[in-house]
Image (cartoon, grey):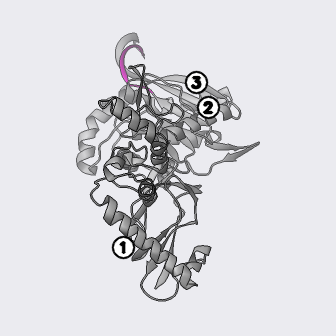
Amino acid sequence: MAKFELKLPQMGESVAEATIISWLKEVGDTIEADEAVLEIATDKVDSELPSEVDGVLVEILFNVDDVVKVGQTVAIIETEGEGSEEATPAPAAKVEETPTAVAEVTKTVAAAKETVSNDFSTSEKFYSPLVKNIAKEEGISVAELDNIAGTGKDERVTKNDILAYIKNRGAQQVQTVAAPKEVSKPAPKSTPATPVSVNGSDEIIEMTRMGKLIAHHMVASVQTSAHVQSFVEVDVTKIWNWRKKMKSAFEKREGEKLTFTPIFMEAVAKALKDFPMMNIAVNGNTIIKKKNINLGMAAALPDGNLIVPVIKNADQLNLVGMAKAVNDLASRARANKLKPDDIQGGTYTVTNVGTFGSIMGTPIINQPQVGILALGAIRKVPAVIETPEGDFIGIRYKMFLSHSYDHRVVNGALGGQFVKQVADYLEAWDSNRDI
């Protein structure tokens, strides 16, 4: 028999660590190559970590909610054959060297199997080995465990959830005897696990993991950058009419919907080539001028949160390529199928606040970038139209561009000129353009 170390791989540019969300396999389980062993989270993206080999999971080295560095061993898998399949020897591999260590591993496997078969096989919910062991030691039944509200992914019970339950178990039992109709006792205000009623009306709701990350990033950005905004109104009547004329043929030919987003992204990419000092990052007292133009595209997730997948080398894409990239990232974001690398490396961000009906917004910069552009809702408005024969009032399609930029390194002239250049590209749209 041989031991294989399952390590946390490099998952994308600048990704140095991940949080373990849940274990999909338990000690003693048989695993096939490419089968998912655990779920991990890096910043805003959740993904599964598969096994590289066939074998039996004999040791889990980290618990749920633990933070693991790239390259660290998270589990030991026992495989058929002799020798070791480890790329780099690690202390955990020494369990092979003595009969006592082997006996301990065997005992652990047997205990895990006994726990699964004797106590939790009837439950339809997933529980990590750690949670099951705690439940067994504390005499918590399957039915009791099933009633604990979980705060993990898909409402799974975490170590903190079961420990909090055990802490308040006595009080809950007294409460149940005194008032059988009450479902549960309010959780402590400092660490509420589920929505609880306050005075019969207000609720205290625990922030999700992503919510906490977003809150941290937003506060850090405001504390880091001196935010200032410039606004430009754009006449997009030509684009509106052109898209209306071309969208059916485009979808029939390319199998992709033609939205306004790739048109706007193309204009932003062009403007960044014209104003390369908007395509920069700040590192202490130095400025990093980015070679590639990688456009971040804020997209809504099913739970209402936002994520920013990145279109790499956006300035090298034609409109068809841009449309395919936009649709692909938006689709995978809605399906929670983005990979860690999909949200890394952005140099400038665009967010479409018009999707939610806003005519303009003042977005917060996505660090370490220095600018973000908000696209407002397109509206039909009366406007003065200038012609050689004179001015007249007509109906036009217009929208606002709201540019937030870092005033530490981007002055008002550059910030204003950049957003005006985006507007000029949009207003100069060729109504006879082919795709």
- In the rendered structure, which amino acid carries the disc numbered 1? Thr
Residue 365 on image: x %, y %:
58, 35
Of marks 1 and 3, the one in the foreground: 1
Query: What residue would you read off at disc 3?
Result: 230
Q: Left or right: where does residue 258 sit relative to residue 190?
A: left
Front-lying residue, 287 or 63: 63
Residue 54 on image: x %, y %:
39, 77
Q: Quick one: label 1 or label 3, which is nearer the N terminus?
A: 1
Q: Is residue 35 visible?
A: no
Residue segment shown in magenta: 376-388
Q: Left or right: where does residue 95 sit relative to residue 40?
A: right
Height in image: 30 above or below 405?
A: below
- In the rendered structure, which amino acid carries the disc numbered 3? Ser
Query: What residue would you read off at disc 2?
Result: 405
Q: Quadrant of residue 376?
A: top left
Q: CA distance from mark 2 to mark 1?
A: 53 Å
Q: Quadrant of residue 91?
A: bottom right
Q: CA distance from mark 2 to mark 3?
A: 8 Å
Determine whether the residue tagged by mark 2 lies in a helix, strand or loop.
strand
User: Dividing the image into 4 quarters, which one contains the C terminus?
Assistant: top left
Q: Which mark is residue 30?
A: 1
Q: Quick one: label 2 or label 3, which is nearer the N terminus?
A: 3
Q: Kindly check if marks 2 and 3 are in contact, taking CB atoms under 8 A apart as contact.
A: yes
Of marks 2 and 1, the one in the foreground: 1
